[in-house]
Image: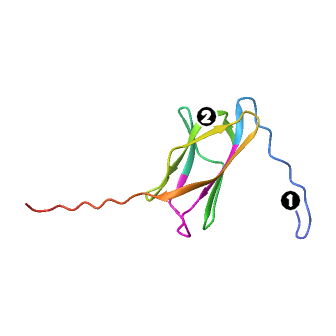
Amino acid sequence: MAKPGETMSLPGFPQPAKGRGQFFVGLVYPGLEAPWDAAVALRIGEKKIAPDVVTARFTHFYAIWFDAPAGQGTLELTSKFWTTDSPTAVEVPEWRTAVRMKIPIVRKPTLKVTAGST
């Protein structure tokens, strides 16, 4: 553990095992209206994997998977009010790190239903 004012070197990210990779994603909010209820997951095959690290700012949302199965999949956004504008296909490379940035988040359309009398 570093002491105040001390400079310390940090180890690099661990190398993924065979059949595994790392994935870093950045999502962009529309303006300064941050979707605080948003959650993201990586789906590869039947597995839905939550990120290891999530950080949100007023304009961006970042998620990191340090040990994900390698292969093609999709990014899933869960929110009451927000979605991605289209399904987001991704690929986690074996033994490497993939980065996808600036994926836009858009507000879900609202539908108001009223009962009318006849």
The residue beneath circle 1 is: 1
Asked if the magenta segment contains residue 25, the reply would be yes
Asked if residue 104 lies left or right of residue 14, the reply is: left
Q: Can residue 82 be seen here?
A: yes
The type of residue carrying mark 2 is Gln
Instruction: Using the rendered image of the protein, determine whether residue 65 is visible from the camera's viewpoint.
Output: no
Q: Secondary structure at mark 2?
A: strand
Q: What residue sits 86% from the left and 54% below the top?
A: 10
Point out the image quarter for the N terminus: bottom right
* Along the viewing direction, whichever of 27 and 79 lies nearer the viewer: 27
Q: Give x and y (percent) for residue 20.
A: 71, 34
In primary-sequence order, the first of circles 2 and 1 is 1
Which quadrant holds residue 91? top right
**Residue linked to disc 2:** 72
The residue range painted magenta reads 23-39
Where 76 sits versus 44, above or below?
below
Amino acid type assigned to the residue bearing label 1 in the image: Met
Residue visible at 80% across and 38% down in the picture: 15
